[in-house]
């Protein structure tokens, strides 16, 4: 496996849904992960999507309208 040259971390209320979005939208491949995170890679870029703990996520509110989510 080649080392990524650029990495980013994204925290999400639903890491599976967010990881699936980036995988589909940007053609990223899931190289590792578990229930708490997913590691996606493409062309030297690595995106790590972390699940926000439920007790914290439950207190967060989105600024998006429901139809935009």
Image (spheres, rainbow, N blue to C red):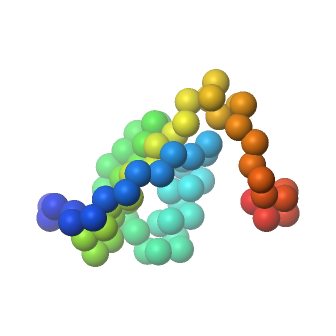
| Vertical comparison of 35 with 67: above or below | above
Give percent across and percent down for residue 17. Answer: 59, 53
User: Furthest residue to the left?
Assistant: 2
Farthest front residue? 63
In the rendered view, does 61 fall on the left or right side of 14?
Answer: right
Residue 37 image point, x, y percent: 43, 43
The residue lying toward the viewer, choosing from 51 and 10, is 10
Where's residue 27, x and y in %? 43, 74
Residue shown at 75% from the left, 49% from the top: 62
Residue 8's quadrant in the figure? bottom left
The answer to whether one can see residue 18 in this image is yes
**63 displayed left or right of 1:** right
- Residue occupying the point 71% across, 31% down: 58
- The answer to whether 52 appears left or right of 40 in the picture is right
**Residue at screen point 53% across, 74% down:** 25
Q: Disc count in the image?
A: 0
């Amino acid at each position: 496996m080649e080392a990524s040259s650029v990495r980013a971390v994204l925290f999400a209320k639903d890491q599976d849904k967010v990881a699936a979005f980036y995988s589909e939208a940007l053609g990223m491949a899931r190289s590792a992960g578990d229930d708490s995170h997913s590691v996606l890679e493409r062309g030297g870029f690595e995106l790590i999507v972390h699940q926000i703990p439920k007790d914290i996520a439950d207190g967060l509110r989105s600024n998006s309208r429901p139809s935009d989510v």
